[in-house]
Amino acid sequence: MSSTSAARTPAHRTRMPTPANRTPVDLSPGEAARVVGQVLAPLVAQGAIIRRPRATAWAERHQADRTARAVLGGLRDRHDRAPLVLGVGPRRFVVVTEREDVRRLLEDSPEPFSPATREKRGALAHFQPEGVLISSTTERWHRRPFNEHALQMDQPVHDDGAAFVDAVRRGVVDLTRRLDSSGRFDAYAFHEAWWGIVLEVVLGTKARGDRELVAILNALRRDANWSWLRPRRTRLREELDRRIASYLRAPEPGSLAASAHRSGPATAVGQVPHWLFAFDAAGAAALRALAIVAARPEVRERVLAEAGQGGSAASWQAGPGPALLPYTRACVLESVRLWPTTFVVLRESTGPTTWGRRILPAHTGFVVVSSFFHRDPAGRPHADAFVPEAWLDGRNDADWGLVPFSGGPAACPGRNVVLLVASHLLARLATRDLRVARWQYLARDPLPATVDHLGLRFRTAGSA
């Protein structure tokens, strides 16, 4: 992307001519078992809604994403790039393997391809039953515009961006105190500081220390990993709503709560849990990007140069709002490309759908495996390399296989807010000369297919 197009959402990608859709093919029982066992099961085991530490550590040891790519790539070649149909219990899913099929699913959302799949409703309803992602088409007509307006989807920098960056500054101070006292921090210390930033950005400074809210949210997210298999804890969810509502009644200026209040306070309580959930995924992306910065001096030098004067305080503000930091944003985007925080993009047909020479019944599930497309070497020579420049020079603009924030009418409306917060965090932490454990693992290309962000550990240069 160019520096101006870096702020675009995927909905603005160039529309390309659509070839005739290939007819979906039914996988044999053996092929279907390989997809379920070697592609989908490891993703489910890691936790789609909140990561399970033991499972993510296992996935890194076994490089689960590399195996998944090999399985899907082999089936794509064997079946001439046709969508792959398999049954999982009573459900029928179509796993797509072509960028143009991804484009069709994303551009034609929410009708006839709804984001509110059965699996997603089962999971997200544990903590955000009114969230836009699992809303019906009629409910989306006011919930989606609310999110777009409150999060200022069409603006590269939110009107309250300066306040968000100030929250980042305070969070970095918290983390660097630990660095100064011990010379090191791990992923859990990082996330403790990250949650302070997120709570302040979303709900205001008074919420910054509300770890009880985070504990409730995470307990419900652990239930959500089990989708329909885990009973709803209605009282706990109501407590989450009460805590969020307490910050929304008199929202602090400079927070997303204030922006939400202006956009429609009656809708806000139901949407805020998803904002908190999405920011958690952004923390994982920022942490992996920080590991690359710590392992690659040339990347760190560019991040610091962009911030100006080695990251001095005077450089963080440019004009009326915070600096956009396009290269640093691109580093965060490249982190999400290499190691997607959303394992799969799901859609469900709202009616019978013609695909090639086949009519698929209503309520067919469609699956886009993010890591497969993000690392697909077909048309992307740098598939396993860290190349943030591809987000700046236009190479990634029209690639519908890249879905770091989904795409089309259901693209993530918080993209630019997330990138602003994550990029400023990354730039500020880059001013510290950090080292990452097992740095050789990340210092050169090709990069590993799976990296467990919960296992990352950092220290300052010179510390033992």
Image (cartoon, grey):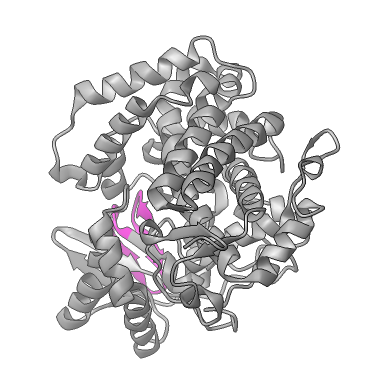
The answer to whether 452 appears left or right of 40 in the picture is right
- Residue 205 falls in which quadrant of the image? top right
Q: At which x and y percent is residue 228?
A: 17, 43
Residue 161 location in percent, x, y? 69, 34
Q: Quadrant of residue 30?
A: bottom left
Q: Could you tell me if residue 108 is visible in this image?
A: no
User: Residue sitting at 20 percent across and 72 percent down?
Assistant: 37
Q: Residue at x 24, y 47 (%)?
A: 225
* Residue, far top: 250
Residue plotted at (61% across, 71% down)? 296
Left or right of 403: which side holds 168? right
The image shows residue 438, relative to residue 159, as above or below, that is: below
Taking depth in this image into account, of 56 and 268 the one nearest to the observer is 56
Residue 317 in the image: x percent, y percent?
Answer: 79, 39
Residues shaded magenta: 346-365
In the rendered structure, the answer to whether residue 308 lies left or right of residue 369 reads: right
Identify which residue, 83 or 292, lies in the foreground.
292
283 lies above or below 298: above
Relative to 146, say whether 172 is above or below: below
Counting every numbered tag in the picture gives 0
Residue 36 visible in rendering: yes
Q: Is residue 160 magenta?
A: no
Image location (x, y in percent) of residue 433: 62, 59
Image position of 202 (left or right of 36): right
Residue 378's quadrant in the figure?
bottom right
Residue 364 covered by magenta stretch? yes
